[in-house]
Image: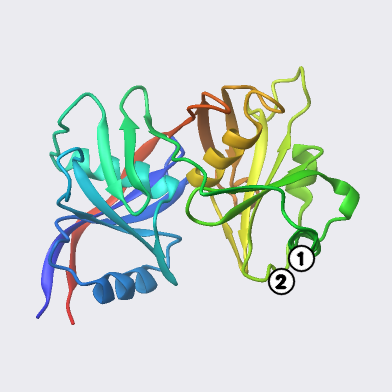
Amino acid sequence: MTVSLPFRQVDVFSHLPLLGNPVAVVHDADGVSSEQMAAFARWTNLSETTFLLAPTTPEADYRLRIFTPTGELPFAGHPTLGSAHAWLEAGGVPRGDDLVQECGAGLVTVRRGERLAFRAPPLVRSGPVDDADLATIVAALGIADDDVVDAAWIDNGPGWTGVLLRSAEAVLACRPGVGFGGLKAGVVGPYPEGTDGHDGCAVEVRAFYDGFEDPVTGSLNAGIAQWLGGRVLPSSYVASQGTVLQRRGRVHVTGGGGEVWVGGDTSTTITGTVGLGD
């Protein structure tokens, strides 16, 4: 049996059309099986596809399941913001001033203001990257060992490692291969201090895993801020991501180190219905 459900595709992290990162959002998905969700995510072939469901706890406004083409994630950033946008646009009314999303990582608060912003969930893995994993990442990025200033696990669900390079220019120069060995590498480098950077951005960020570069990545930027914010980077700043992919992602970070908020502009590009069946 095929069911027809409301659908939105939302562009996240850019105020300009078609220059952010899209997420497919299916509404009213309580009757959709996990297998149907996974099949639709494979079909969209976007970095993430999400499904809005009724919450299972009174603290939450809605529940969210997040799928990549290869599996389910407990949390991801741009799907959180895009799905919150879709839920509000469809008439959702939060219980309080903020939205509360239930997902595999627990409860995530989404703040409304000039733009939507989520409170970064705690890291589930932190600390140094071991030598073997770092060697794999360095080789896959096509850089030298001494290009790396620092590296750490900054995993808040999707599995990110963070790699700090000397400059934004070095980040943009990376020409990665496909040999990441299942690791996910987030690369960050600062624009020169005392300049306006790249359109006012403090850093350039890129997100890699085997055979893929993600255009703009909220979870990664959250982890970077928890790792470097208020120490190597300012407590609040704007990150640029997607430049090499001809996107213009802008990730607005506030907090740094402690309670980090990650925000971005959101806009709906496609509305309609989707038929999901066995």
Q: Label 2: state its secondary structure.
A: loop
Q: Is residue 206 left or right of residue 167?
A: left
The color scheme shown is rainbow
| Residue 43: image location, x then y, percent | 36, 73
User: Gap between marks 1 and 2, in whole Å?
Assistant: 7 Å
Query: In the image, what residue occupies the spot 78% across and 26% down?
Result: 192
| Residue 154: image location, x then y, percent | 60, 46
On the question of residue 132 being in view, the answer is yes
Query: In the image, what residue occupies the spot 46% across and 60% down?
Result: 47
Front label number (1 vs 2): 1
The residue tagged 1 is 136
Residue type at numbered disc 1: Thr
Vertical comparison of 266 with 180: above or below: above
Disc 1 vs disc 2: Cβ atoms closer than 8 Å? yes
| Residue 158: image location, x then y, percent | 50, 56
**What is the count of numbered marks?**
2
The residue tagged 2 is 179
Q: Is residue 241 left or right of residue 174?
A: left
Query: In the image, what residue occupies the spot 67% across and 71% down?
Result: 181
Quarter of the picture containing the N terminus is bottom left
On the question of residue 217 being in view, the answer is no
Using the rendered view, name the quadrant where residue 236 is placed: top right
Using the rendered view, name the quadrant where residue 188 is placed: top right
| Residue 193: image location, x then y, percent | 77, 22
